[in-house]
Image (cartoon, grey):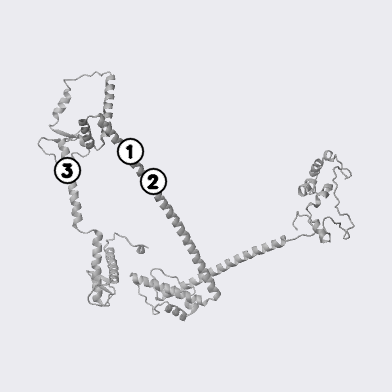
Amino acid sequence: MAAGKGMDAASYLKKHGWKGDGHSLDPSSRGIKKPLLVAKKVDVLGVGLNKHAAVSDQWWMRAFDQGLKDLGTGKTNALTNIREHGMFAGGLYGRFVKGEGVAGTFAEETSPKRKREDNREDSAKENKKQKVNAEHGAAQRLKKDVDKQVEAFVAEAQHRGVLDIGDKKSTRGKVSPVTAYGEAAVQQVFKQAGLSIEGNAAQSSTKEQKYERQMQLRELKRAAKSFITFQLSNVERKQIEAYELSIKKARKSERKLKDAGRAAREAEKTAAREAKALRKKEKREKKLAAREQNNEDSAYGKDEAKESIPASKFAKYEAKAAAKGISVHQYIQNRDEKKAAQASQGSTALSTPGLAFVVDTDGDAALSSVSAQLPSGEHVVDSEGSIRFTVAPGVSVPLDPAIWDGIKVKTLPKAVRKARRQWMEDKREARKAGKSRKSSSGQSKGEKKLEKIEKLCIKILVESRKARGSQTATIDGLEDVPLVTVEAKSEGPFSKEEMGLARTVARRVLKEQRRKAGGSGGKRSKKEGG
C-alpha cells in the first residue's frame, strides 16, 4: 500500500462480521452501540514533562558544547542526529507522532506490479530498437559486400577488354569473380549482360556509342547483382530489399522536403514581386494624381491670368511659354519672380553708397607695345597664355583638333568653332559609313563557323555514301575524317539521324584542326587539362 494512506476501520470491522453503524461489535448485540469518544487533554500534568523545560533547558548550548568536545574523534553528536533524523525523532513527543505514516494491514498493492509492467514495456521497446539497428547494420554490410562484388565483375570485364567505360577505371579487388564463382559463372554473367566474350571492345567518341557503352555497363551491373543476390539466402535477400526500400523512402522524403522548401522560396519571391508591383502601382497613382492636380492648378492660373492680363500680352506669353516647353502659368510666375529679384537688386544698389572710380584716358604704354607686337587677327590662347593659333582674315581654319584641344569652346573664335564643328560632323559620318560597310560586308564569325560546319557535314555524308564500308576519308585536305553509317542508296535526301551524326563529326574535326593549327589560343578542354 502506498505510504500516507490510513486504514479503513469500518471496512476492516465489516470484514469480521460487523453489521455497521448503530450496531454493537458483539454478534449478539449485547455491547454498546455508540463509539467511545476521545477526550482531549489540554494540560501537561501527568505526562512526565516539566512545563517550564522549554524555557529553562538550553539544550542547544549543551549540544554545541558536546559537538566541540567530539570534534575530530569520529563520534556522532546531538547536532548530527538532529541533522539526520530531525529534531523530534525519539523522546516522548516522538511516540505521539510516530504512527502517522504507518500503513494499514490490508490494501491493494498495485504499484510494484505497474512498475514491473512499465519496466517490461521499456525493455521491450529498447530491445526492439536494438534489434532494428542490428538488422539495419547487417543489411548495410550485406549491401556493401554485394556492391564490391559487382564492381569486381566490372573490373574483370574491363580487364578482359569486353567492356569500355572511358577514362574511368575500376580497380580489381583482392578476390576476383573467377576465384569466387568460377569461369563459367563469369561468362554466364557477361552473356546475360550482352557482352562479347571475345573482347576487343571498340573505343569511339560518338554520342551513340557512348550511350551504348553506358547501357552495357548498366546491364552488366544488373546481371552481376542478380547473380550475386541469387547466391545469398532468403533472409539475406529480404534484408537487402528492406534496406534498399528504406533508402528509397528516405531519399523520397528528402526530395519532398526540398520541393517544399523550393515552393516556399518561390512563394516568398512571388509575394515580394507582387508587393513591389503594388508599391510601383501606388507610386504611379500618386504621380498621376499630383499631375492632374498640377494641371488643374495651371488651368486655374491660366484662367486667372487671362482675366488680369490683356489678350495681346497673354498671346505673347503663351507663345513664349510654348517655345520654352512650359505652361503659361509657370512662365508668368517665373517672369514675376525675375522682376521681383531685379527690383530687390535695384533697391540694394540705391541703399549702398556709390564707390569712387578714376578713368585712365592715357593708358599704359607697356601694354600698348605688347598689343602692337601681336599679329593681327583672332587668336586661340591656351590656359598658359601662349598663342596656339591665329585666324588670318580670308584664310580657312584647318580641321586639326590640336588647335582647339583642351580649350573651352566658348573662348574660341567663331571661325575655329565652325572648323571644330565641321571636323566633328566628318568624324561622325565616317563612323556611320564604317558601321554600314561592316554590316553589309558579309556574315558574322558565328555564321561563318556554322556555314563551314554544314558544308563539311554534307561532304562527309556524300563520301560516306560512296565509301560503303570505309571508316575514314580525306576531305578538302583534311586527312582521316571519320565517316558515318548511311543507307545504301545512290541518291535521295539524308535522314535526320545521319545529318546529326555527320554534323557532330564535322564539328569535332574542325575543332581538332583549330587545335593543331594553334587557333584555339592554347586552350585545352577540361578532359585534356585533367
Residue 269 position in % (x across, y down): 41, 52
* Residue 307 image-quadrant placement: top left
Q: What residue do we see at 46% from left, 75% from top?
A: 224
Mark seen at residue 423: 3
From the viewer's perspective, is 298 left or right of 166? Answer: left
From the viewer's perspective, is 369 left or right of 170? Answer: left
**Residue to which mark 2 is pinned:** 279
Q: Are marks 1 and 3 in contact (CB under 8 Å)?
A: no
Q: As displayed, is residue 456 above or below residue 418?
A: below
Question: Which amino acid type is marked by label 1?
Answer: Gln
Q: Is residue 410 visible?
A: yes
Q: What residue do we see at 26% from left, 36% from top?
A: 327
Mark 1 or 3, closer to the camera: 1
* Residue 478 image-quadrant placement: bottom left
Mark 1 or 2, closer to the camera: 1
Dot 2 or dot 3, earlier in sequence: 2
Classify mark 2: residues with Cα within 10 Å, few (<14), some (14-19) or many (20+): few
Residue 442 position in % (x across, y down): 20, 58
Dot 1 or dot 2, earlier in sequence: 2
Q: Secondary structure at mark 2?
A: helix
Question: Which amino acid type is marked by label 2?
Answer: Arg
**Residue to which mark 1 is pinned:** 293
